[in-house]
């Protein structure tokens, strides 16, 4: 039996029924990692010793007849911008390549309390700035569906690990699509929860008003299980919401009768690959046949979302990344003869090109004389983008769009930054409005997975989970395994 | 062109970064490409629109002023590039 092909909920049953031990399961995952990791490069750091020790603890509990949590003993992996006490956390940057965190992120505390297993830390675009995972200091991650293509990003390592069978579940973070787009490119399920649902404490800050942690998994049920563990109020993050966290598995009901699904017309226009469009339209027809009501809606400010994002996110990033000064932690240039020179040289040598570009863009739009023209204007347009969604949700319960207008593209670095930025037009507005969004596999184009995005009202993860689950159960896309083809 | 190579140098200085001379031309070009694209925002009349800095109706989150355990001295210094007498060591700050 190839254990690495199973889902977390299937493996929980096997652990509880003593068909397999957590130590066997964890070893099976490391064997799989040994077999394919040199092709995929999904991981930055592995933590086998601690993972096996934790697995043995869970096995002892099962042997003693104690109850275990749904994710207990099930091996997962964590994006490398989420702080894990004692385990190197690099943000895939030279700047933090030796950083050993002294505290756990809130989500990690919750997962540890549930006795889950951390196989290691997954690769990403440096500081989560990118859509391809090519900007990692530790080398690009390759898409398990075709190793010559990008896995998407910035949580490309987390999504590729799922697709390649190198982890059962993973965590990613999503600032402008960084969970949903790689989930889509790798045939996985990925959720960005409502802003405030999950504490950002311990997630290295990129753009604080947009960042949110969420799961990347093999199916919708596993995504709900991870959400159950990571959501909730945390006193260390003042933006984490003090609201009730429902049991998200209760939303997993295969029924969309009467559900009003809105299709924002702006998401189906120019730039959308016709083959991706065809798969999305097939999914819409299926929903209709299952009793959902399809409504066309408009989000008129969609075309401004990308540039608004590329003003607001770099502005916040330029402030957040000011902490990397070479003094207290992180990379330090040792040839400088004064403290200010040390900081400038440490940052210049420690950050990659894209991170520098965004810090400088952010510095520019916040600088005297340009603040109103760029930053304030972008914040005003953000208000208009939010209002578009409020209007649309008067006519429907969820919005359905392609997760990305294209499938995963070749790793060749031929695209200029702006062309890559523009492909995020389908995911960025969801962060701007703070809404929950899920990507589920809905077909293939040119042999690569296509993802469908479902967007919900604030705090209404339950409805997008139900809609996603209903579609998933009526199809087999989530059961197709990535072939690891191509010639990396 | 919105910014020149000299502007880029100045922005880099504000950001505590340097851009190598060999990359300056390409960097300036890409910077301008993005700023030129931002011109589409000028099409929208935003007079009187409240800016959104944050999506949540949350502000001034307070808690009881109770002392809690923090990190230890050793933990705080554990990732420091250089340590001297229990503090962070840096090169000379003033002449």
Image (cartoon, grey):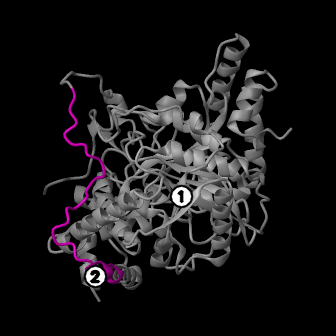
Which stretch is magenta?
A: B36-63
Above-or-below relation of B4 to A143: below
SS for dot 2? helix
Q: Label 1 belongs to which residue?
A: A261
- Which mark lies nearer to you, 2 or 1? 1
- Is A418 covered by the magenta stretch? no
Above-or-below relation of A177 to A212: below
Q: Position of residue A308 (x, y in %)?
A: 34, 69
| Total tally of numbered discs in the picture | 2
Left or right placement of residue B54 versus residue A134 in this view: left
Above-or-below relation of A377 to A210: below
Marks 2 and 1, how far apart in space? 31 Å
> Which image quadrant is residue A311 in?
bottom left
Residue furthest to the right: A1
Above-or-below relation of A423 to B95: below
> Which image quadrant is residue A78 in?
top right
Q: Position of residue A296 (x, y in %)?
A: 50, 68
């Amino acid at each position: 039996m190839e254990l690495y092909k199973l889902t977390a909920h299937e493996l929980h049953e096997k652990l509880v029924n003593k068909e397999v031990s957590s130590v066997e399961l964890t070893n099976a995952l490391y064997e799989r990692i040994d077999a394919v990791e040199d092709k995929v490069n999904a991981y930055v750091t592995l933590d086998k010793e601690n993972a096996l020790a934790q697995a043995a603890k869970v096995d002892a509990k099962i042997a003693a007849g104690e109850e275990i949590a749904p994710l207990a003993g099930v091996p997962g992996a964590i994006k490398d911008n989420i702080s894990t006490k004692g385990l190197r956390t690099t943000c895939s940057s030279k700047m933090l390549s030796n950083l050993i965190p002294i505290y756990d992120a809130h989500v990690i505390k919750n997962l540890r309390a549930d006795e889950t297993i951390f196989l290691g830390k997954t690769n990403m675009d440096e500081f989560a700035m990118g859509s391809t995972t090519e900007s990692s200091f530790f080398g690009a991650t390759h898409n398990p569906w075709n190793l010559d293509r990008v896995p998407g990003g910035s949580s490309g390592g987390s999504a590729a690990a799922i697709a390649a069978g190198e982890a059962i579940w993973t965590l990613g973070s999503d600032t402008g699509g960084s969970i949903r787009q790689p989930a889509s490119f790798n045939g996985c399920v990925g959720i960005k929860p409502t802003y405030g649902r999950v504490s950002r404490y311990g997630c290295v800050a990129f753009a604080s008003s947009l960042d949110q942690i969420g799961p990347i998994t093999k199916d919708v049920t596993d995504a709900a299980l991870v959400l159950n563990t990571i959501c909730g109020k945390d006193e260390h993050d003042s933006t984490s919401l003090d609201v009730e966290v429902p049991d998200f598995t209760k939303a997993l009901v295969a029924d969309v009768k009467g559900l009003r699904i809105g299709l924002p017309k702006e998401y189906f226009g120019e730039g959308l690959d016709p083959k991706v469009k065809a798969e999305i339209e097939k999914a819409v027809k299926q929903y209709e046949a299952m009793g959902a009501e399809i409504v066309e809606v408009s989000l008129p400010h969609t075309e401004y979302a990308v540039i608004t994002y590329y003003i607001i996110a770099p502005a916040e990033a330029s402030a957040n990344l000011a902490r990397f000064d070479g003094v207290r932690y992180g990379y330090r240039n040792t040839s400088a003869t004064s403290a200010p020179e040390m900081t400038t040289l440490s940052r210049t040598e420690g950050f990659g090109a894209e991170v520098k570009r965004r810090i400088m863009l952010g510095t520019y739009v916040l600088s005297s004389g340009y603040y109103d023209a760029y930053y304030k204007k972008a914040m005003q347009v953000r208000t208009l983008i939010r209002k578009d969604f409020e209007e649309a949700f008067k006519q429907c319960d969820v919005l359905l769009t392609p997760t990305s207008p294209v499938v995963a593209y070749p790793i060749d670095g031929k695209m200029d930054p702006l062309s890559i930025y523009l492909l995020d037009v389908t995911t960025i507005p969801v962060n701007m409005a703070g809404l929950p969004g899920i990507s589920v596999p809905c077909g293939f184009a040119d042999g690569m997975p296509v993802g469908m995005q479902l967007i919900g009202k604030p705090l209404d993860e339950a409805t997008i989970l139900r809609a996603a689950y209903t579609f998933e159960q009526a199809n087999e896309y989530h059961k197709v395994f990535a072939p690891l083809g191509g010639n990396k | 062109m919105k910014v020149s190579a000299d502007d880029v140098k100045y922005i880099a200085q504000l950001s505590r970064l340097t851009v190598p001379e060999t990359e300056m031309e390409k960097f300036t070009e890409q910077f301008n490409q993005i700023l030129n694209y931002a011109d589409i925002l000028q099409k929208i009349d935003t007079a009187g629109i409240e800016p959104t800095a944050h999506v949540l109706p949350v502000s001034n989150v307070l808690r009881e002023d109770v002392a809690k355990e923090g990190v230890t001295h050793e933990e705080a210094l554990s990732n420091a590039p250089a340590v001297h007498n229990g503090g962070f060591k840096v090169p000379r700050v003033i002449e």
